[in-house]
Image (tube, helix red, strand yellow):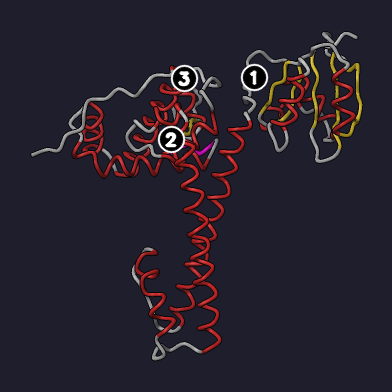
Amino acid sequence: MDIASIGIDLGKTTFHLVALNHQGKVVVRKKFSRQQLLAFTANLQPSLMGMEACSGAHFLGAALRGQGHDVRLIPAQFVKPFLKSNKNDFLDAEAIAEAVGRGNMRFVPIKTDDQLDLQALHRVRDRLVHRRTAVINQIRGFLLERGIAFAKGRTKLRDQMPAILEDAEQNLTPRLRNLLDHLWHEWKQLQTDIEAISQEMELICDADAACQRLRQIPGVGPLVATATVAAIGNGAAFHKGREFAAWLGLIPRQYSTGGKARLGGISKRGNSYLRRMFVHGARAVLLRVKYDTGGFGSWVRQLEARTTRNKVIVAIANKLARIAWAVLSKGVDYRHAPVCTQV
């Protein structure tokens, strides 16, 4: 059978496969269950296969690659232009088969099991942090309705919660006091879970050579290091650091025409969680830059003198992302002038 490329539209239980020949004609159009699909592809000659980078794609991609096929994952937004007429599962698979054969198409590397585990840890921790913030805000709202206010941040409220619950003079009804006690216990349990996951990430970071190299970069701790490795591995999907920074959305959005360059705010595309981690790391760098007498500190101080703080933070995050890609792709340690305290 003359097969040039194969597109597979993924689902939870059903999978639609379309194969194109070298003239772009459909030669196979079939619907499978997961086991039927793997049995069918096992009997095919090694072929170029494409799938959208969505839930379950990494598992199936690894399984098909184990059968000898050349499997490539495509971001869904890059498949959309190849979809003709109406939308259904077979047309989606045909669009994937056409897109995967393009020489200038951008692909997503298939993640290893270790990367998927790290990614899962980060997602669970991020969900717990959001839940903790929601609980704290709810406690603040209930207390404010009774005339009790606290300063910004969770430290003040956390230190005063036991006294509030035990103080009988506070303007709290028994029902509200019980409800606040329940929220307080939920907060403590969430904090325990977050700390447990953070400690596990630190252990993983200490045992991983790539994470150790990333931690040498200013503003990069265990969270940023493990999140970067989970997202891009060794950085082979990008040809240079600028591409990684653009993928994170840390560059201006461009809308140029007629020879006139129009640049807006940052594009905020790509991995929003990893972008947030790098921005937090950039804030930490900006706080300690006065102690840095090397070239990096000099660059930050010059930038800070001519633009606003938020723009400086985004510029630092962009530079940190590019440095991180260089460290991962080249497999070398971060080289920087020693940091010393000014007298």
Report which quarter residue 162 is drawn in: bottom left
Residue 27 pos. (x, y %):
91, 16
Q: Which residue is mark 2?
A: 206
Residue shown at the point (38%, 80%) measured from the top left: 163
Distance Cα–Cα, label 1 vs label 2? 36 Å
**Label 3 – label 2 distance at C-alpha:** 19 Å
Query: Residue 275, position in %: x, y?
Result: 47, 39
Identify the residue at horizontal 87%, vertical 8% (top origin). 2
Foreground mark, 3 or 2, reads 2
Q: What element does badge 2 sit on?
A: helix
How many C-alpha atoms fall within 10 Å of the one at disc 2: few (<14), some, or many (≥20)? some
Give whichever of 9, 331 is nearer the camera: 331
Left or right position of 86 against 333: right
Residue sitting at x 27%, y 39%: 307
Q: Which residues are magenta?
A: 265-269
Q: Are marks 1 and 2 in contact (CB under 8 Å)?
A: no
Looking at the rendered image, the quarter that the N terminus falls into is top right
Q: Position of residue 318 (x, y in %)?
A: 39, 32
Ranked by sequence position, the earlier of labels 1 and 3 is: 1
Three-letter amino acid code at disc 2?
A: Asp
Inspect the image, locate mark 1, and give the three-letter code of the amino acid beneath it: Met
The residue identified by callout 1 is 105
- Residue underneath mark 3: 329
Callout in the foreground (1, 3): 3
